[in-house]
Image: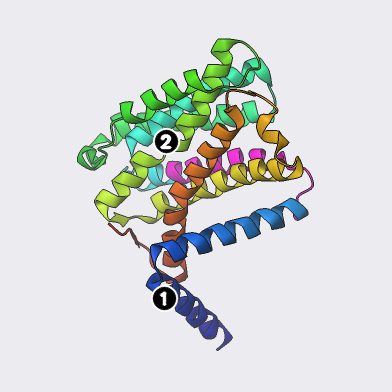
Amino acid sequence: MGKRRGISAVSVLFGWLRRQSKKVKTALGIILSLLLVVSLRFTVKNHNHFFVASEAIHAAGIFVLIYKLTRQKTCSGLSLKSQEVTALFLAVRLICSLNMEGDIHTFLDLATFVLTLWVIYMIRFKLNSSYVKELDNVPICYLVVPSAVLALLINPITHGFVTRVMWAFCVYSESVSVLPQLRMMQNAKMIEPFTAHYVFALGIARFLACAHWLIQVYETGGQYLWLIGAGYLWFPAALLAEIVQTFILADFCYYYVKSVMDGQLVMKMPV
């Protein structure tokens, strides 16, 4: 009986949310996100762990895709263009990381990069017959070119010019890398479970990374925004990129949680 009441309460909650306007949903989403950030700020002592967790969750999402590709022998619902943009920014970030850090972030980036290349290989060659190219219709140049131009204009002032432009390019291109995947899912209107799990993992990963930035800004009284790249607006631009990607994925995450709570195996996306 208790379990039924719990499910009923969740259904009532989502039903109430569904009836609200988009402005109300957005406001509630922002409030909930801020409450989660505040709770993370007081429960996690080392806030650098957010980035490690973000990268680890991204890698876990790739493992979900690997399971789908190897067991189900299909790449339907997956965006090749999203994977290619992901591989591009990971390759560039890996080069920067080897020059600048060479730590756990480098290892996680390398693992995710190799796994992403494998996914691209499977989609392009092994399972190409199940790839629906017509639905994957966001041109890569629309994502890469603006990111490159913005990286040339706004970047940190540490290290050499090439390195800092490459690092800025990683931040900007990562923030829009999921757009082809979301667009493809909107075109298909139906999302099978493993693809949904993967994109939800990306949403959680981006939220943790964004939480790190917000907490650092709060704890430094806003000074964190101007520590590097003063005069070039690097930190504000990087933070904005994180926020943009988080909100891009927030709508999907809402429908993902709703589908899970409703016990739906196949997720539906609104037009």
User: Residue 238 placed where, x, y %?
Assistant: 56, 33
User: Residue 82 placed where, x, y %?
Assistant: 38, 36
Q: Which residue is mark 1?
A: 15
Going by the numbered disc 1, the residue's amino acid type is Gly
Q: Which residue is mark 2?
A: 177
SS label for mark 2: loop
Specify whether residue 44 is painted magenta. Answer: yes
User: Residue 198 placed where, x, y %?
Assistant: 45, 47
Furthest residue to the front?
Answer: 231
Nearer to us in this view, 240 or 133: 240
Magenta span main SS: helix
Q: Is residue 181 visible?
A: yes
Q: In the image, 256: left or right of 268?
A: right
Quadrant of the drawing holding the C terminus: bottom left
Which residue appears at 49% of the width and 24% of the height? 169
Going by the numbered disc 2, the residue's amino acid type is Ser
Which residue appears at 32% of the width and 26% of the height? 141
User: Residue 97 placed where, x, y %?
Assistant: 62, 21
What kind of colouring is applied to the model shown? rainbow
Nearer to us in this view, 159 or 106: 159
Q: Work out how far the residue at label 2 is from the one at label 1, CA to CA, in angstroms.
A: 31 Å
Furthest residue to the right?
Answer: 45
Q: Which residues are magenta?
A: 43-66
Q: In the image, 124: left or right of 58?
A: left
Say the numbered circle drawn on residue 147: none
| Quarter occupied by residue 73 | top left
